[in-house]
Amino acid sequence: MLEIFLLTLAVIALLSIIFEEVTHINKAKTTLFLGCVSWITLFIAAQTPEQTAIISEELNENLLEIATLWLFLMSTMTFVAYLNAKGMIQVLVQKIFPQQVSVRMLMLQVGAFALVLSTFCDNVTATLVSLGLLTTFNLDDQMRCRMAVLIIFAVNSGGVALITGDVTTLMIFLAGKVHISELLALFIPATISVLLLSVIFSLNAKGTVSTTPIKQSFNSIDIVIGMIFLVTIFLTMVLNVLFAIPPVLTFLAGLSVMFLVGKSSKTKDEEVQILEYIRQVEYDTLLFFLGILLLVGMLKEIGTLDLLTQVYSMYDPGVSNFFVGVGSAVLDNVPLTAALLKADPTLSTAQWLGLTYSVGVGGSLLVIGSAAGIIAMSKVQELTFVAYLKFVPALLLCYSVGYGLTLFLANHLHN
C-alpha cells in the first residue's frame, strides 16, 4: 500500500509537469512539494528505529548528490551568466559562425558544435553554452524550439564517447567494463545519429538567418575571467581523471578565483554588480532538479530500481539495454546504471558499449530525462513537456539508429 501511494505521488509529479501550461502551477514547486512529501511519508511509515535510521541514511546520501549537483550548476551557470551578460559568448559565436547562414546549415553546425563541446565538457556547461548560440540568431519560436531539442540530443550523445563527458560513462569505465579506446568508437554512432536528427529537423526549414549585432562591452578583466572559465573546464577534466577530484570542487575553486579577480580590479559597486550574476541564475531550474532528484531517490529507496534490474536479466542484453535507455528518460540514469553495475550481469564488451550509449543518450527521449533537457526547458520558453513530445518519434528513430550502429561497430571491432 505504501509503495502504491509513493508511486502515485511520482505519477502526479509527472502529470504536473505535463499539464503545467493548463494548471499554470510552476513545475519546480509541484515536484519539490511532492518530493518532500514522499520522504516525509517514508519516515512516518517506518515501524522501527532501525528502519528510520536506514531511511535517514538514504536521505542524507540523496541530499549529498543533490547538493553536489546544485553547487556545480550554480558555479557553472554563474560563469555563463557573467560571460553572456558581457556579450562574450555572442561575440565568440560570431567569430565561429558566419554572419548570415541558411537555416539548414545552421542546424548542422549547432548540432556538431554541441556534440563536440559535450565530449570534452560536462553536460551542464555544454548545454548552457550551446543554448547561448540561440540568442545570437534571429530565429522564430518553432525553429528555436527545434534547435533546443537538437542541442539536448547532441549534448547527451557527445557525452558517451569520453569519461569526461558523462557520469554514467565514467561509472562503467571505472567498473572495468570498457576501455578508453573502445569508448572512443562510440563517437561515430553518436555523430551519425546527431547529423541524422539535424537533417530531419531541417527538412522543412527554409531561408537564412543572421546574427544579431553585438556591441562589445567587455574589457581586459572580462577576458581574464573568460580564460579562468576555460582553464576551470580543462582542469576539471584533468584533475578528475588523474586524482578523481570531484568536478564540483574544481568549479567552485574556479568560481572563487573569478570573484578574487573581480575584487582586485573592480570598484565596490562593480563588485556588487558581479555578485548579482549569481542572483540571475535560474533558481527555478535548481528547485526543479531538487524535486526530481528527491522523487528518484524515493523510487530507489522503495526498490523500484531493483525491480527494473530483475526485469533486465529476463531478456537478451541487446534488447534490455535498448529499453534501459528508454527507461532513463523517466528515471535518473545514474542510479539506474549503479543498480545494473551492482547486479553485475554477464555482458560482452559490445553489450557494455551498447549500455553505455543507451543510458547516455536515452534520456533525450523526454525533456525531463536529462540535465540538458531540464536546463533547456527552463531557458527556452517555447520548450515545454508537451511541445517536446512531438519530437519524440524523430528522437526515437535517431536513438535507435545510434544504438544499432553501436552494436554493429562494437561487434565488428571484437571479431
Image (cartoon, grey):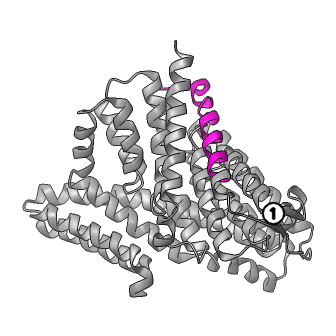
Residue ranking furthest to the top: 415
Q: Is residue 13 above or below residue 164?
A: below
Q: Can residue 344 be seen by looking at this rendering?
A: yes
Main SS, magenta region, reads: helix
| Quarter of the figure with residue 181 | top right
Number of numbered discs: 1
User: Where does residue 293 sit, x and y in percent of width and height?
Assistant: 39, 62
Residue 206 is one of the magenta-drawn residues = no
Name the residue: 31% across, 70% down. 35
Q: Give the amino acid type for the residue marked by disc 1 in the picture.
A: Ile
Q: Position of residue 263 (x, y in %)?
A: 79, 73
Q: From the viewer's side, name the closer residue of 150 and 102.
A: 102
Query: In front here: 234 or 356?
Result: 356
- Regarding residue 25, the answer to whether it shows in the image is no
Tell me which segment is drawn in magenta: 176-198
Residue at x-position 67% and y-position 70%? 144
Pointer 1 residue: 225
Relative side of 8 to 355, left or right:
left
**In the image, what residue occupies the spot 26% across and 45% down?**
308
Instruction: Classify residue 58 as left or right of residue 290.
Output: left
Q: Is residue 192 above or below residue 22?
A: above
Side of 308 relative to 117 (left or right): left
**Front one among 281 and 333:** 333
Q: In the picture shown, does residue 411 fall above or below 66? A: above
Q: Secondary structure at mark 1?
A: helix
The relative height of residue 48 versus residue 195 in the rendered view (above or below) is below
Residue 62 % position (x, y): 36, 58
Q: Quadrant of residue 268?
A: bottom right
Task: Tell me where residue 7 sits by quadrant.
Answer: bottom left
The image quadrant where one finds the N terminus is: bottom left
Q: Residues within 10 Å of mark 1 (few under 14, many from 20)?
A: many
